[in-house]
Amino acid sequence: MGRVKGRDTKPELVVRSLLHRMGFRYRLHCRDLPGNPDIVLPRHRKAIFVHGCFWHGHDHCVRASRPTSNQDFWNSKLDSNKARDNRHQGDLECLGWQVLIVWECETRHVEILKTKIERFLRDGK
């Protein structure tokens, strides 16, 4: 697990490239915010997390199926990841930030992702 990249992943690069083409400028991995969001738009007070479907437990996604061996370890690990994600999102919202979660599988459909990001930046949802 030590070799799993935490930043500059392919899905993250897709989202960053899309935001840049849309004309937005952003900060990366802002350490002074809870959870170190992958992308931060300070002017808009919006944070974007790009989550891997497996590691963060994307519901109803084929990529998020849990391993059948060593189930106690994996269930504990993946459940604690989800709990930590929820805690960080709640902390950010308490500080007045709006949070968007982009899942790894969503980065495969750039036009749909663009619509989702535009809606988030316009409406905050």
Image: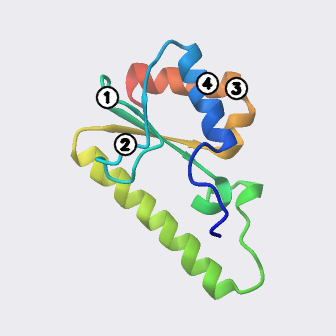
Percent across and percent down for residue 91 are: 28, 53
Q: Which residue is mark 4?
A: 17
Disc 2 and disc 3 in contact, CB within 8 angstroms = no
Image location of residue 42, percent across then percent down: 31, 28
Image quadrant occupied by the C terminus: top left
Where is residue 92 drawn, in percent x and y?
30, 47
Dot 1 amino acid type: Pro
Residue on which the image places disc 2: 30
Q: Amino acid at mark 3?
A: Val
Placement of the N terminus among the 4 image quadrants: bottom right
Q: CA distance from mark 2 to mark 3?
A: 25 Å
Q: Earlier in the sequence, mark 4 or mark 2?
A: 4
Name the residue: 68% across, 36% down: 107
SS for callout 2: loop
In front: label 3 or label 1: 1
29 and 72: which one is in front?
29
Between the residue at mark 4 and the residue at mark 3, the CA separation in whole angstroms equals 11 Å
- The structure residue drawn at horizontal position 55% and vertical position 80%, both measured from the top left corner, is 76
Q: Residue 66 or 45: which is nearer the viewer? A: 45
Q: Could you say whether the residue bearing mark 4 is in a helix, strand or loop?
A: helix
Q: Which mark is residue 110?
A: 3
Task: Indicate left or right for 88 with 64 as reference.
Answer: left
For marks 2 and 3 on the same chain, the one whose residue lies earlier in the sequence: 2
Residue under numbered circle 1: 42
